Image (tube, helix red, strand yellow):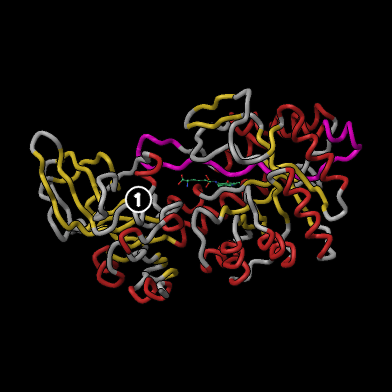
C-alpha cells in the first residue's frame, strides 16, 4: 500500500508529491506520513484479528492502537473510521483521544503510576477499561470509582516471566521491572483475589505486554499460555471465568533490510491457536482477545526528511553528514542504539557510496541519527535525505533540546499534503517561558 517511488530525475515522490516540493512547502526537518498506508495497516490488523475471532460464536478480538507511538487528532479520527480502539497512558493522550471524538468506552488507560487525577478523569469520562498495574492501584481505582458512583471495568497487568528480545525470548525465573504484577509467587493470583472483592471494580480480564520490536511469535505464545493458566486458576478458585485477555503490543517492524517482521495475520493465527488450545485443554470458554500494536501500525508509515547542511570527510574514518534535525526529532538511535537506513532522495547519483554517519545539529557527539550508512560521495549541502520508518516513537519522543523547534507531521494522501501537527515556532517556546 506504500505510495513511494522515484521519478525520472531521481527525485523521490510520496503519495504523488516530490520530496523537493514537500520540503519547499513544509520545510525540513519534517515527518511525512502516508495516510493510506496507515489506514491499510489498521485494516490489516483489525481484519486479521476479526477473522481469527469469527471462527467460533461469541468470540471476538479487538485491536487497541498504542497511542504512545504517535498520537494526534487526525490519527484518532483515522482509528475511529477504521474501527480500532485506543490505548492511552496519560491524561494528555486521553484528552487528545476525547477531543477527536474517540468514544470513551473504546479507550484503555495504562500506566504504572497513574495519578489520582488521571484515574478520576478516566473513570469520570467512562473509559472502557483501566489496566491495573500494582496492589496500591487496585485499591486506588476501586475507591475513586466508588466515590464517583461507578463500577470501573479493569484488567490486571501481569508479568509472565518472558523477556522478549529480537529473534528470541528468554524465560526469566524472576521478575525485575516496574510494570505489572508477577505471576510468580502467586502475586497475580493475590491481586485477582483483592480485585474481585472490591465493589468499585469489575474485573474483566488479564493483560500482558512482553516487550517491543519483537520478531518472534514464540514469546507471545508463552505469554498466552501463562495468562490462560492464570484464568484457569481463577476459575478453579473463584468459579469465575474472566471474559477477556489482552496480549499487548510489541510486533517489530523493518528499520533496515535485515529486519524481517511478522504479518498481522501470522501473529493473529499464532495467538488464536495457542489460546484455543490452552482453553480447550483447561475447559475454559475462549476469552475475547485484544492486542495493542503501536509501532507496527504507525512506524513504517512515515519518514523524516532532512536537509544536508555540512559534509565533513575524515580520511580513513568516515564522513559526517550533518542534517538540520537530530536527537530532538529522533532520540531512538542515541537511546536504544536503534538502526535506521537513509537515502538521498532529492536527485539521482551515480557517485561511489561512502561510509557515512548522519548526525544532528545538537551540542553533543551522541547526537546520531544513522550510525552507519552508505551515501553517495557527491553528497552536498542542500541535498535532501530521508530516514524511513520514523512514524513510531520519533515525534512522540521529540524534545526541545537546545530549544529546537519540533518538526511538523505532514499527512500525504492522493497527491495532497497537509500538516496534522504543525511545526513549533519560537512563540510556542516562549509562551511557556513565563519567568
Ligand atoms: N501496550 C503496552 C502496555 C505498552 O507498554 C506498549 C509499548 C505497547 C502496547 C505498544 O508497543 P509497540 O507495539 O509499539 O511495540 N520508546 C520505545 C518503545 C517503548 C514501548 C513502550 N510500550 C522505542 O522507541 O522503541
In the picture shown, does residue 152 fall above or below 284? Answer: below
Q: Which residues are magenta?
A: 233-260
Closer to the camera in the image, 268 or 67: 67
Q: Secondary structure at mark 1?
A: strand
Which residue lies at the image location 77% right of the left edge and 29% below the top edge?
Answer: 186
Where residue 251 sits in the image (x, y, percent)? 53, 41
The N terminus - image quarter: bottom left
Q: Quadrant of residue 83?
A: bottom right
Where residue 116 sits in the image (x, y, percent)? 69, 59
The C terminus - image quarter: bottom left
Which residue lies at the image location 82% right of the left edge and 63% below the top edge?
Answer: 147
Q: Left or right of 243: which side holds 20? A: left
Q: Quadrant of residue 269?
A: top right
Residue 52 on the magenta span: no
Q: Which residue is mark 1?
A: 388
Residue 254 on the magenta span: yes
Predominant SS along the magenta part:
loop
Closer to the camera in the image, 204 or 254: 204
Q: Quadrant of residue 210?
A: top right
In the picture shown, does residue 414 fall above or below 379? Answer: below
Amino acid at each position: 500500500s506504500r505510495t513511494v517511488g522515484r521519478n525520472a530525475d531521481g527525485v523521490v515522490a510520496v503519495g504523488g508529491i516530490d520530496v523537493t516540493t514537500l520540503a519547499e512547502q513544509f520545510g525540513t526537518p519534517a515527518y511525512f506520513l502516508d495516510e493510506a498506508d496507515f489506514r491499510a495497516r489498521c485494516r490489516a490488523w483489525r481484519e486479521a484479528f476479526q477473522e481469527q475471532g469469527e471462527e467460533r460464536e461469541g468470540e471476538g478480538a479487538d485491536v487497541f492502537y498504542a497511542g504512545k507511538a504517535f498520537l494526534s487528532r487526525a490519527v484518532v479520527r483515522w482509528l475511529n473510521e477504521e474501527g480500532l480502539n485506543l490505548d492511552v497512558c496519560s491524561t494528555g493522550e486521553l484528552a487528545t483521544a476525547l477531543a477527536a471524538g474517540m468514544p470513551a468506552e473504546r479507550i484503555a488507560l495504562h500506566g504504572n503510576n497513574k495519578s489520582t487525577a488521571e484515574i478520576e478523569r478516566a473513570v469520570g469520562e467512562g473509559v472502557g477499561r483501566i489496566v491495573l498495574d500494582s496492589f496500591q492501584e487496585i485499591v486506588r481505582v476501586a475507591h475513586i470509582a466508588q466515590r464517583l458512583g461507578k463500577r470501573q471495568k479493569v484488567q490486571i497487568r501481569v508479568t509472565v516471566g518472558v523477556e522478549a528480545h529480537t529473534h528470541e525470548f528468554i524465560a526469566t525465573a524472576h521478575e525485575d521491572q516496574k510494570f505489572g504484577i508477577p505471576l510468580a509467587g502467586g502475586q497475580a493470583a493475590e491481586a485477582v483475589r483483592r480485585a474481585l472483592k472490591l465493589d468499585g471494580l469489575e474485573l474483566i480480564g488479564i493483560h500482558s505486554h512482553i516487550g517491543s520490536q519483537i520478531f518472534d511469535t514464540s514469546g507471545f505464545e508463552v505469554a498466552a499460555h501463562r495468562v490462560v493458566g492464570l484464568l484457569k486458576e481463577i476459575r478453579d478458585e473463584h468459579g469465575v471465568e474472566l471474559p477477556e485477555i489482552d496480549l499487548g503490543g510489541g510486533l517489530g517492524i523493518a528499520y533496515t533490510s535485515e529486519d524481517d517482521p511478522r504479518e498481522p495475520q501470522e501473529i493473529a493465527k499464532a495467538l488464536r491457536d495457542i489460546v484455543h488450545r490452552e482453553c480447550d485443554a483447561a475447559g475454559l470458554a475462549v476469552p475475547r482477545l485484544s492486542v495493542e500494536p503501536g509501532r507496527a501500525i504507525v512506524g513504517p508509515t512515515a519518514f523524516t526528511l532532512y536537509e544536508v547542511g555540512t559534509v565533513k570527510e575524515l580520511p580513513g574514518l568516515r564522513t559526517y553528514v550533518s542534517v538540520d534535525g537530530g536527537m530532538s526529532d529522533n532520540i531512538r538511535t542515541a537511546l536504544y542504539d536503534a538502526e535506521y537506513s537513509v537515502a538521498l532522495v532529492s536527485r539521482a547519483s551515480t557517485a561511489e557510496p561512502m561510509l557515512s554517519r548522519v548526525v544532528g545539529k545538537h551540542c553533543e557527539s551522541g547526537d546520531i541519527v544513522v550510525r552507519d550508512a552508505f551515501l553517495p560521495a557527491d553528497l552536498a549541502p542542500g541535498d535532501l535525505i530521508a530516514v524511513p520508518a520514523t512514524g513510531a516513537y520519533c515525534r512522540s519522543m521529540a524534545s526541545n533540546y537546545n530549544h529546537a523547534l519540533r518538526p511538523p507531521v505532514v499527512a500525504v494522501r492522493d497527491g495532497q499534503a497537509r500538516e496534522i501537527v504543525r511545526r513549533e515556532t519560537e512563540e510556542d517556546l516562549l509562551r511557556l517561558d513565563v519567568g
